[in-house]
Image: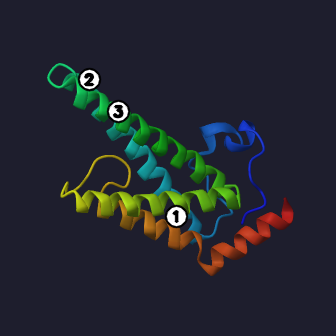
Amino acid sequence: MPTDGPRNFNDVMPQGGFSGMFKTQGLPTELKVSYFIWVISGLLGLLFGLIGFFAVIAAFAFAPAIAALALVLLLLALAVAAAQVVLAMKMKEGKEWARLALTIVAAVSLLLAIFGAANGSGSGMGLGGNWFGFLVSAVAVVLMWLPNSQLWFKAVKGHA
């Protein structure tokens, strides 16, 4: 288990804010690719979630009960997508707890893909609601745990 867990809210926020989102100097190639997979999929999740938000608002006119449930699920998906971006930025800083949390996000996307397939919903809604989403997150997880990435995390931990 990681020993570098956050102790307060400021430990969770990326150093220097979101302005350094696209700076990846010093990272091994595997982690750069994994980082950009996580950030881009998180940003796409936020974008599609905001678009879906307008559809849910419109649905309140026709089916308020279903729209209320969809709104709760959509807000949850938006929160996870935002957390995914923040966790990726913390992983880029060498925080092992963020790498573990992103691995858990991928595991949840697997569960959502299985649940979506069992319900016959096809592509599903929100983060990880489909097999493609799971496969993309699985690639990012594998890249985070490759030997070269492990060595980088150990080296960063030694300097912190």
Q: Which label's residue is closer to the chain start, 3 or 2?
A: 3
Q: CA distance from mark 3 to mark 1?
A: 24 Å
121 vs 111, left or right, is: left
141 vs 14, left or right, is: left
Q: Which mark is residue 50?
A: 3
Q: CA distance from mark 3 to mark 2?
A: 11 Å
In the picture as drawn, the residue positioned furthest to the right comes out as: 159
Front label number (2 vs 1): 2
Q: Quadrant of residue 16?
A: top right
What residue is at 48 percent from the left and 39 percent from the top? 79
Front label number (3 vs 2): 2
Q: Which mark is residue 34?
A: 1
81 vs 123, left or right, is: right
Q: Which label's residue is closer to the chain start, 2 or 1?
A: 1
Specify the amino acid type for callout 3: Leu
* Rendered location of residue 128, percent (x, y): 37, 55
Is 119 in front, or is 142? 119
Specify the amino acid type for callout 1: Ser
For label 2, the residue is: 57
Q: Secondary structure at mark 3?
A: helix
- Mark 2: few/some/many CA within 10 Å (<14, 14-19, 20+): some
* Rendered location of residue 21, percent (x, y): 58, 46
* Rendered location of residue 7, percent (x, y): 78, 44
104 vs 115, left or right, is: right
Front label number (3 vs 1): 3
- In the image, residue 134 sits, relative to residue 9, either above or below, namely below
What residue is at 22 percent from the left and 22 percent from the top? 60
Q: Which label's residue is closer to the chain start, 3 or 1?
A: 1
